[in-house]
Amino acid sequence: MLCALGTGRVLYAAAATMRLSTAAFFLFGASRGAAFGGLAPIARHANIAGARRSLVMAAAASLTGSGSTSPIASVGLSSPFAMAHPSTCPTSRRISQTLLGATHSALYSRGGSTASSSSSTALNSAVAEEMEKAEPVAKYRKDYRPLPHQVTKISMDFDIHDGETTVTSRLTIEPNAKFTAQEGESSDLVLDGDETSVSLISLSIDGKDLEEGTDYVLAPGTLTIKDLALKPGAVLESTVKIVPEDNTQLAGLYKSGSMYCSQCEATGFRRITYYPDRPDNMAVFESVRIEADEDAYPALLSNGNKIGEGKAENGRHYSVWSDPFPKPSYLFCVVAGNLGSISDTYTTSSGRKVHLEIFSEHDNVGKLDYAMDSLKRSMKWDEDKFGLEYDLDLYNIVAVNDFNMGAMENKGLNVFNTAYVLADQATASDVDYERVEGVIGHEYFHNWTGNRVTCRDWFQLTLKEGLTVFRDQEFSGDMGSNSVKRIEDVRGLRGRQFNEDAGPMAHPVRPESYISMDNFYT
């Protein structure tokens, strides 16, 4: 993911003076949990460029071949990476600039289910009020525990109306084999949910309504399902109401202008529905059905491949999407709007024909061509350099004027602020073209470094971001000049990052605690 600052510019993460640091932390730290300080001898090696190149080749060797099992793929959940598939790779950009600066220091310095609408609203209002009064609670890296139960599959229905959207979710629950209860530890299923955004309407398991207090407990920030109410393969169905038009946090599903859009990294999915909203719960989103007014929202998009569409009653229509690959909830995305687009195709090295489409407001469509060219170059480069080809039938990008982040790598449906997609010869500079190419590449490279392979928890944010930054820097260098790119990245580190590391905002690359994960993106 890329984060835009208030100035509208992005501080590109430079895994720079030492691009080796990012790759080194991934290769050594991912399997041993090593701190950056342990890499100091490598950093002091006289031939830093040579050491960096060796690490790159090692990384490339481990990533080559989507069907093989690399050394990284064999790492279990006890490592920083939760594996979606025995294929591998790494991921992203702006966050690393804020966090990777510390790399320099480390390397050089050593309802009662069908409750009535009124009672449900009262319950959620009471919990929301309690949340607002609650003191902030810090999360500590040392406290990580695997979930006792995991969501392995999920299906969702979005019924979008002006002023209210109904979301119905069906979660398939399975015991987590990696969980062993400690003394006094509960085995209940705890789902995350933000009552300031989500109002619970109904809750059932395998068609049986759950009783509040006996089967579940609704509390500030959580919905806890008692372990006794669960059995292997149980399907938990919930219906909630949300109001995207009132979502001024721009986390979860919100309305921007005439378009509905979502942003779920890091913890926005809990503002859409109740779910274990953490990276180590990777589920297959089997079906996401979106229904809305056809005239107002002709484009209905989500992750994965489109498996159905059609007309509904009262001038409405729907589309159905399916993503066959497990992913964490932060990569979920929904877009509904009146959008124009350009389209193209790309044939992968194995012969898969991929439909490419870039959407934007209608008056921006004429400025999308360079972004499309950059996407195709990114796909070809990743195949040639790392042996990694795209794994779905569709790849969509949406450019949004009011998107609150710079860009987001949602699986198969990237969302960008228009500043990082639009370019035309009449107004764009060379720097504009380079920025579009770099950001398009960065978010595409996340498909393997961040999406198919992701972090265990948010304390390992720089693992997915740092390696993807490294990859996009190599890509930009190969598309232009490696020497010039190197100088630009080092200047960025020296001009911005080192100043931050020398001041009161300095912090470790891997923090020991945080109160709000969103603070790490600004």
Image: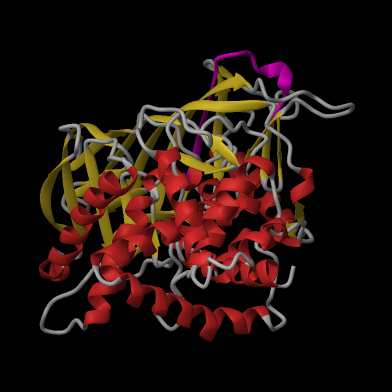
Nearest the viewer among 152 and 116 is 152
The x, y position of residue 360, in whole percent, is 21, 62
Nearest the viewer among 20 and 85 is 20
Nearest the viewer among 362 and 377 is 377
The x, y position of residue 418, in whole percent, is 28, 69
Q: In which quarter of the image is the C terminus?
A: bottom right
Residue 105 image-quadrant placement? bottom right
- Residue 28, magenta (yes or no): no
| Residue 495, placed above or below residue 467 | below
Instruction: Specify whether 278 is left or right of 55.
Output: right
- Residue at (33, 41) in percent of width and height: 303
| Residue 147, placed above or below residue 89 | above
- Residue 228, magenta (yes or no): yes
- Residue at (30, 72) in percent of width and height: 435
Q: Quadrant of the N terminus?
A: bottom left
Q: What stretch is highlighted in magenta?
A: 225-241
Nearest the viewer among 22 and 294 is 22
Residue 260 image-quadrant placement? bottom left
